[in-house]
């Protein structure tokens, strides 16, 4: 397995090992909420690689209070970061360059009254043949759908639609308000349905945003729960649909599934780490696109990279 090491002063960033995979038909129809499968033609490139890991730490000084990270499929090597409440309503395109320095480009999010009330996560998707980004605003209980701009360009990021949501129930727990959520993902990856992980609950409850319509409020439907997990701030599915990484503020776990959502939620934990103690991890993804390596971003500027050991 080939890895690329990028120096960051005394630290080193080991980028995720790339794999070639067919993500399957772009217009694949998504079946039942809890039984939907990742595209059948996707290879199981990542499923056998996480029995041990290599952990490194770097930093992106410009991006304190990072709260979400999404890899771009349309623009290889690039990712998108958002920041928590009190920071600009902007998407930040990031790329780790060969000289070990991150390129960071800010793209203000504009249109339909866009504001950063409490942005907690971002995920990459494709819709109607175009790449989009979904931003979870927990404070407003809505999800922004945004057209993906050219990462290295200067254009603003335009809001396409806003989807309001509400939870169908109340839960008890220790991780903030009952409606708190800090993690979203698409399943199947890229073209599937949006799923929201409730942070307050333990075990963490997972809901689907099914058939949302702009201008109306959709009641989420519960589809399952994350085994042995609570206070979740990150949930991301590998691009081949075989792994699920979850993280709380100071720890992360990698779960292995068999291609269905239910198998990922209850899957065996094949790797876990507490390397991020004290840093308040808020976002993460398999980065860059097509990689089996995981990058986590934190409020405290640190970036934690986990790569399957060779």
Image (cartoon, grey):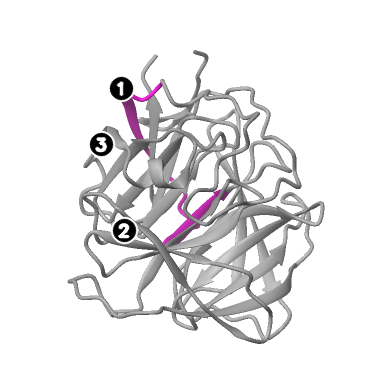
| Image location (x, y in percent) of residue 43 | 58, 24
Q: Earlier in the sequence, mark 3 or mark 2?
A: 2
Q: Quadrant of residue 85?
A: bottom left
Q: Secondary structure at mark 3?
A: strand
Disc on the earlier residue, 3 or 1: 1
Q: Is residue 65 visible?
A: no
Left or right: 168, with 92 as reference point: left
Give SS at disc 1: loop
Residue 115 lies, in percent from the top left, at 58, 81
Task: Measure how far apart labels 3 and 2 are at the Cα level.
Answer: 14 Å
Residue drawn 61% across and 63% down? 134
Neighbor class of circle 1 (other Cα within 10 Å; few <14, some 14-19, many 20+) is: some
Image point (49%, 13%), residue name: 1
Do the residues bearing badges 1 and 2 touch, measured as CB atoms within 8 Å?
Answer: no
Residue 197 in the image: x percent, y percent? 39, 62
Q: Is residue 222 above or below residue 163?
A: above
Question: From mark 1 to mark 2, how far is it between C-alphas?
Answer: 22 Å
Rounded to the nearest angstrom, the CA distance separating label 3 from label 1 is 10 Å
Relative placement, left or right, of 138 versus 200 is right
Residue 272: image tag: 3
Judge whether residue 47 can be spotted in this image. yes
**Membership of 180 in magenta stretch:** no
Q: Which residue is mark 1?
A: 51
Marking on residue 232: 2
Where disc 2 sits, the SS reads loop
């Amino acid at each position: 397995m080939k890895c690329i090491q990028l120096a960051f002063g005394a630290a080193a960033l080991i980028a995720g090992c790339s794999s070639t995979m067919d993500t399957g038909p772009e217009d694949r129809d998504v079946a039942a909420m809890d039984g939907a499968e990742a595209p059948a033609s996707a290879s199981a490139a990542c499923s056998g690689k996480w029995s041990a890991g290599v952990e490194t730490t770097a930093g992106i000084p410009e991006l304190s209070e990072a709260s979400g990270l999404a890899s771009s499929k349309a623009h290889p090597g690039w990712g998108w970061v958002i920041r928590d409440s009190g920071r600009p309503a902007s998407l930040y395109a990031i790329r780790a360059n060969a000289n070990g320095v991150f390129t960071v480009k800010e793209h203000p999010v504009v249109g339909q009254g866009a504001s950063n009330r409490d942005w907690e996560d971002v995920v990459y998707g494709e819709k109607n043949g175009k790449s989009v980004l979904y931003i979870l605003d927990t404070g407003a209980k809505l999800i922004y759908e945004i057209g993906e701009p050219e990462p290295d360009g200067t254009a603003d990021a335009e809001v396409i639609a806003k989807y309001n949501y509400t939870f169908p129930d109340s839960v008890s727990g220790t991780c903030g308000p009952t409606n708190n959520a800090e993690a979203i993902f698409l399943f199947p990856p890229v073209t599937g349905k949006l799923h929201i992980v409730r942070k307050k609950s333990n075990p963490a409850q997972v809901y689907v945003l099914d058939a949302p319509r702009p201008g109306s409020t959709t009641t989420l439907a519960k589809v399952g729960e994350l085994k042995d997990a609570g206070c979740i701030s990150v949930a991301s599915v590998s691009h081949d649909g075989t792994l699920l990484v979850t993280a709380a503020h100071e720890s992360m776990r990698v779960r292995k599934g068999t291609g269905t959502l239910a198998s990922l939620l209850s899957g065996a934990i094949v790797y876990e780490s507490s390397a991020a103690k004290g840093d308040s991890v808020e976002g993460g993804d398999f980065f860059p696109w097509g990689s089996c390596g995981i990058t986590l971003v934190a409020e405290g500027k640190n970036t934690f990279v986990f790569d399957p050991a060779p």
